[in-house]
């Protein structure tokens, strides 16, 4: 089946998407929306109706249920006629066993028609990736993979590091570059979450062999955010087997995660050993120079000219996430395109970027001891108990809650937090995840958290991604 995207419709769609994304204040929600929108493989238009196809059934349903109203409004803003209908559909990607033979016919121009489960973002290239001390090793490893996919010692390549620091960008750059060099290779990009969704769907259709055939037929598997696998043993088992099959056939595997493999607490040891068996690289928080260089690069791609003093202001004030810097740059550029000749004072910039800067500053203010002390007080336990290994629930909850606040509301690194709690990294991550899960269902716990945060002048929504 051909996926043809009508270019004009796609452009209108992209414009509407930009407008939509600019209306979302929370970074967390924005990333989620982006993730689902990235599963779109084509946009076609017939009359007033935009038909948006996604690479899997679940995301079509999800987009329809959650975003269709608002996307429709945004489309109406960009379509000259102002009238729009919107449909989300699932278009099944052909399974590889059917696709490959077609290619075998012409010897010279072999092009894989394998459709990646989630599309590669073509803007995520090596050219667009700014090298700095915080990422140079990861970048070098990524380039080594491209030079010799599956065959070098970098298999798997495992990239870890905090949110918004460029893991997905680098991983997709690997995919884009390999595809360019050897179009005959089947490259598959997806998140671990999506892998799990698909597994569940195939299982529902009693077609696990189809699922296995699909993922074992790829030449390059790019699996993003594998920390997600902690949610289920069965999916770990499934992936373990696929991993081994790919590795045995000298197919390349690249993975990312927000922590190093050894700090993935509920992942089986045999998988962790596999993850560590190739090349492990960390991306760290970028320095001021790297932040500025990234901003300059991003600004080049904008239609408006953003002056250097603005970029320097952003690089200086926003330190923790590249993604937050991009958000700030986006906001300034919208302003500058409306008022191109304005000169922005530091006060004006502070005002304009208030949301982003305030977040950074509040993040810095909190220190871990204060968090521990306040949480202990609220739960009427002593600091000693909070830091002890004691396992009773009345002590575990405040302990884990304090870990959660330290992790989600400060810029302290995992090792720093672990040290302050006298625990291992894995224990901290486990504690944080546990609270995360409980917050979804326990209103009381959420209320206590809000109360504690309020004492520091924070809101639940100040949470970092
Ligand atoms: P992660 O997957 O680590 O959460 P992403 O890869 O999604 O982070 O990066 C977030 C944003 O920051 C992306 O838009 C990406 O292009 C940008 N970014 C991060 N690091 C760099 C870099 N070194 N050069 C250019 N852009 C970067
Ligand atoms: Mg990512």
Image (spheres, rainbow, N blue to C red):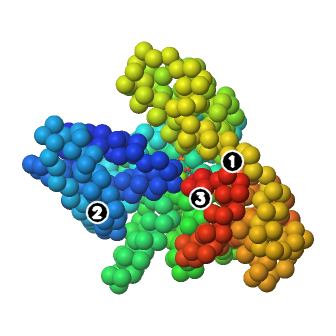
Q: Is residue 338 above or below residue 389?
A: above
User: How many residues crowd mark 2 within 10 Å: few (<14), some (14–19), many (20+)?
Assistant: some
The quarter of the picture where residue 296 lies is top right
Taking the image as shown, residue 263 lies to the left or right of residue 465, namely: right
User: How many residues crowd mark 3 within 10 Å: few (<14), some (14–19), many (20+)?
Assistant: some
Disc on the earlier residue, 1 or 2: 2
Q: Give the farthest residue toward the left.
A: 47
Instruction: Say which residue label 3 marks.
Output: 460
- Residue 425 on image: x %, y %: 76, 63
Instruction: Say which residue label 1 marks.
Output: 363
Front-lying residue, 361 or 319: 361
- Residue 218 on image: x %, y %: 43, 61
Disc on the earlier residue, 1 or 3: 1
Residue in the image at 52% along x and 45% along y: 169
Q: How many marks?
A: 3
**Marks 1 and 2: CB-CB under 8 Å?**
no
Label at residue 20: none
Q: Measure the alpha-carbon separation of dots 1 and 3.
A: 13 Å
The image quadrant where one finds the C terminus is bottom right
Question: SS for tag 2?
Answer: helix
Taking the image as shown, residue 180 lies to the left or right of residue 385, namely: left
Q: Measure the alpha-carbon separation of dots 2 and 3.
A: 28 Å
Taking the image as shown, residue 183 lies to the left or right of residue 313, namely: left
Front-lying residue, 425 or 95: 425
Whether residue 238 is visible: yes
Disc on the earlier residue, 2 or 3: 2
Front-lying residue, 232 or 356: 356
């Amino acid at each position: 089946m051909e996926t043809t995207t009508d270019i004009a419709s796609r452009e209108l769609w992209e414009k509407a998407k930009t407008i939509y994304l600019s209306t979302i204040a929370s970074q967390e929600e924005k990333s989620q929306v982006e993730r689902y929108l990235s599963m779109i493989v084509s946009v076609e238009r017939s009359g007033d109706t935009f038909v948006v196809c996604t690479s899997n059934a679940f995301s079509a349903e999800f987009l329809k249920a959650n975003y269709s109203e608002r996307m429709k409004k945004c489309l109406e803003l960009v379509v000259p006629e102002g009238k729009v209908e919107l449909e989300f559909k699932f278009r099944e990607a052909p399974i590889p066993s059917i696709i490959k033979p077609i290619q075998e016919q012409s010897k010279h121009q072999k092009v894989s028609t394998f459709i990646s489960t989630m599309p590669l973002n073509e803007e995520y290239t090596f050219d667009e990736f700014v090298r700095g001390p915080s990422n140079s090793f990861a970048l070098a490893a990524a380039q080594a993979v491209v030079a010799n996919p599956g065959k070098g010692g970098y298999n798997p390549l495992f990239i870890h590091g905090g949110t918004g620091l460029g893991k997905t960008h680098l991983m997709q750059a690997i995919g884009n570059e390999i595809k360019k060099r050897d179009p005959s290779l089947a490259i598959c990009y997806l998140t671990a979450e999506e892998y799990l969704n698909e597994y569940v769907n195939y299982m529902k259709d009693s077609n696990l062999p189809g699922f296995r055939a699909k993922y074992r037929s790829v030449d390059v598997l790019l699996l993003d955010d594998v920390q997600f696998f902690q949610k289920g043993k069965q999916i770990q088992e499934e992936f373990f087997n696929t991993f081994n099959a790919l590795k045995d056939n000298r197919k390349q595997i690249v993975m990312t995660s927000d922590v190093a493999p050894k700090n993935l607490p509920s992942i089986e040891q045999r998988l962790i050993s596999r993850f560590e068996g190739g090349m492990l690289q960390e991306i760290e928080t970028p320095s001021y120079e790297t932040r500025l260089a990234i901003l300059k690069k991003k600004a080049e791609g904008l239609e408006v000219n953003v002056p250097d003093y603005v970029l320097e202001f952003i690089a200086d004030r926003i330190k923790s996430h590249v993604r937050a810097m991009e958000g700030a740059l986006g906001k300034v550029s919208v302003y500058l395109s409306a008022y191109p000749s304005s000169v922005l004072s530091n006060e004006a910039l502070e005002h304009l970027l208030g949301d982003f800067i305030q977040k950074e500053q509040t993040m810095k203010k909190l220190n871990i001891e204060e968090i521990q002390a306040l949480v202990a007080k609220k739960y009427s336990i002593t600091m000693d108990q909070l830091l002890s290994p004691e396992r009773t629930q009345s002590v575990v909850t405040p302990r884990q809650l304090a870990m959660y606040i330290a992790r989600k509301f400060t810029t302290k690194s995992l090792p720093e937090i672990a040290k302050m709690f006298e625990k291992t990294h894995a224990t901290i991550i486990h504690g944080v995840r546990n609270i995360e899960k409980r917050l979804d269902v326990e209103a009381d716990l959420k209320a206590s958290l809000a109360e504690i945060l309020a004492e520091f002048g924070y809101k639940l929504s100040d949470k970092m991604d």
